[in-house]
Amino acid sequence: MKLGLTNKEIATIVDGEILRDVNGKVDILIYDTRMITSNRAGVFFALQNKRNGHIFCQRAYDKGVRCFVVSEEVELPNDTCIIKVEDTLCALQTIAKYHRNQFSYPVLAVTGSLGKTMIKEWLYFLIKDHYKVVRSPKSYNSQLGVAISLLEMTEKHDFAIIEADISHPDEMTKLEEMISPTLGVFTGVGKNYEDNFESKKQHNAEHLKLFKHANITFALNEEYSTLRRSKINAELTEIEAWDEFRPSDSPFAKNITLALFVATFLGVSKSELLEKIKSLPKLSDRLEVFEGQNDNLIINDTYNIDIDALEQSLEYQFSSDERQKKVVVLDLSSLNTERKEQILSLVESYKPDEFFIIKDTTIPKELKELKGVSILFKGPYDSPLKELVKQFKNRKHETWVEFDLKAVKHNIDLIQAKLQPNTQVLVMVKASSYGTGDVNIPHFLQQIGVDYLGVAYTDEGTTLREKGIQLPILVMNTEQNAFDDITKFCLEPSIFDMKNLIAFREHLLKEGLSEYPIHLTFETGMNRLGFDAEDLPELLEYLRNQQEIKVKSVYSHLADADNTDSAYTENQIQQFQNIKEAVEKVFSYRVLFHILNSEGASKFGDTASFDMVRLGIGVFGYTSTAKENVLLPSMKWKTTISQIKTLKAGETVGYGRSYKVDNEIKIATLRIGYADGFRRNLSNGVGKVFINGKHCPVVGNVCMDMTMVDVSNVDCEAGDEVEIIGDHIDMETFSKHLGTIPYEVMTSINKRVARIYLR
Ligand SMILES: *Cc1c(COP(=O)(O)O)cnc(C)c1O
């Protein structure tokens, strides 16, 4: 960034009042004091974000800033220039707009609900050998992010790609004025429009305001009528247009097609694109998080040593309370002195408990001895850190499941957007969050702000409390002998009959507790656990005459929500409505009502969400309607090849010799077996895995710890990665092979399989 503006020019551009005039010139714009890493002259904008930026003016001064744009009174030494404006964000945006207008090269803007960052990054990758591209860092696409992105433009570039996002009506006009894009990419808004918009039409129209003055906007054919309605000058394409590459095989077919289409338009040859597409970058702003040895939490970000990405990793590490002590390990060997200093001062501003700089694969003794801390590893793509991190892995077993936490958040957001306003979200994290691991997902849910967690049994709740989860926790199935733990760990029991209700109240009396939150479960058709509607008079009478118990919520559970015939579900909802009316009459305080699970929320979220929904499988993207609702699959299961053998006619494979070789065959032995959850009924061709572009059937019987597959036609070697569930074998297909449902697949992956969480 190089602004090259005098203090006076800034005041004129933002139309501000100069409270104190001091001559000076600034080069960089600062809105966060942690960004101040060099002594280049900067102007500090005191934004009113989550925190009031005016509090940080003095710190900015201490770090050398002498020009300030403020909207409140601030006390600063006399050698500062102070410019007062109505709205500091607006002023910053005005500077960004001014800056953008200094350049006449093409500015391409990307907007829509889904896939913006992906398209931006891929398009960059496809055209970067032909243009000097400046692009938005990470997903900088908000009112502030867009301004920051535009400020990155310099005369050294000749093409800009800027990402823009909106969450409220009337936000786009500002972004359009700032960016004034010459080209556009519209990714569409999907089936769902956001909460703050009245309709999909309005949501579309708001996005398209960005392209009012653009010369050409690129989109998929399916957006034709939307673009025409908004009178946008568009070029459209279809997925089939890229038959040679068959993007339809990829879950990101639409984004890939769009990126390819725009790149062709910009003059990149088809043959070059087909070559490049093979190595499309995996989006690098993802962190791998896993439980390491010595109870350490490992945050692996050894993909690049970009300062923005580093800040994002530090933000995550320091805002999470998964471990109290924070340790940072860096490899800075590839950097020049200036960048080194920037990075060091950024890391120091977070005040890590310990800080290591690594030069090769030797691990300092102090680092090896750490226990119970979170360790962030950060280094460039080719750094020896990549190998070193592996030594911190808990399990050396080369079989693992990956959970994509971005997909988890996407799924929750998407389901929530369709619920009635103000509906709370409870996420069921029973059975170690559907087999995903004890606490990582709950911590993530706590961080992204879900309202409630639910577990099946008391022990699951106590584990969450011991690992630092503070959200309210509903326990579905409580036993009298667990009541001590319930109150000791502030868990909220579900009560399903009078006997337990009375016993729990006696426990509260003994403990001297009052107004203790509980939940009441009612039967409406599941026939599993719960009060019946006819218990109501006795139950309500009992509750009315005591102070120990406070009913926090009343709920029921759907038995048949995934059936396309919704009659049974509608009947359950009606019965629940009747129960609600009876209960509400009795209590003077507010009680929450909820009946919908994931499947129910997908189908009845707009009419029957009551006060809360209880999500489980939908969070991971595996409801029966996941595809049409654009929920994203969040889980991949991988293993590796340990050995490859060629067998001759007449030989047999594995226990029981159930496979006899007819013609010479090449087999691979995989590091996975029925003890991992790759069950024995996948034996003899029932199950398949995916290796280097090919599906490979299981040969012989699956063993406890190993499985053999046919790789006769596959180019592969020992150590290669094997997909069990992923982009090519989806959860649905795998479940079908096993003759079960995604719930059982997820929860039967053995503990010895390592869990990795991608952020
Ligand atoms: C497991 C469970 C849920 C979540 O169900 P999904 O189908 O995974 O969304 C909700 N409510 C209750 C009572 C449950 O037991």
Image: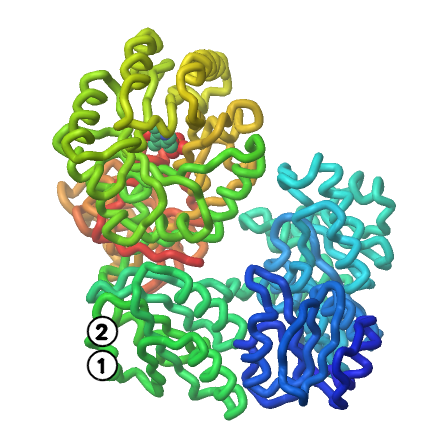
Between 756 and 179, the one lying in front of the other is: 179
Corner quadrant of residue 100: bottom right
The residue at 42%/58% (across/down) is 758
Q: Is residue 604 above or below residue 157?
A: above
Q: CA distance from mark 2 to mark 1?
A: 7 Å
Find the residue positioned furthest to the bottom: 337
Is 641 in front, or is 448? 448
Q: Is 632 displayed left or right of 717 in the figure?
A: right
Residue 9, image x, y percentages: 82, 81
In the figure, is residue 510 to the left or right of 518? left
Relative image position of residue 353 (x, y in whole percent) = 32, 76
Label 2 Cα crowd, 10 Å radius (few <14 / some 14-19 / many 20+):
some
Which mark, by number, is residue 366?
1
Residue 418 in the image, given as x and y percentages of width and height:
57, 34
Q: Residue at position x 45%, y 55% from top?
A: 693
Question: Which quadrant of the figure shows ligand 1?
Answer: top left
Question: What is the three-letter code of the residue carrying label 1?
Answer: Glu
Left or right of residue 310: residue 207? right
Q: Are marks 2 and 1 in contact (CB under 8 Å)?
A: yes
Q: Nearer the viewer, residue 51 or 137?
A: 51
> Horizontal and vertical percent for residue 362?
27, 84
Quadrant in which the C terminus appears: bottom left
Quarter location, residue 38: bottom right
* Image color mode: rainbow
Find numbered disc 1 in the image and state the secondary structure of the residue it sits on.
helix
Residue, disc 2: 370
Residue 711 can be seen in this image: no
Residue 334: give its label.
none
In the displayed structure image, the side of residue 190 where residue 438 appears, left or right:
left
Query: Foreground residue, 740 or 719?
Result: 740
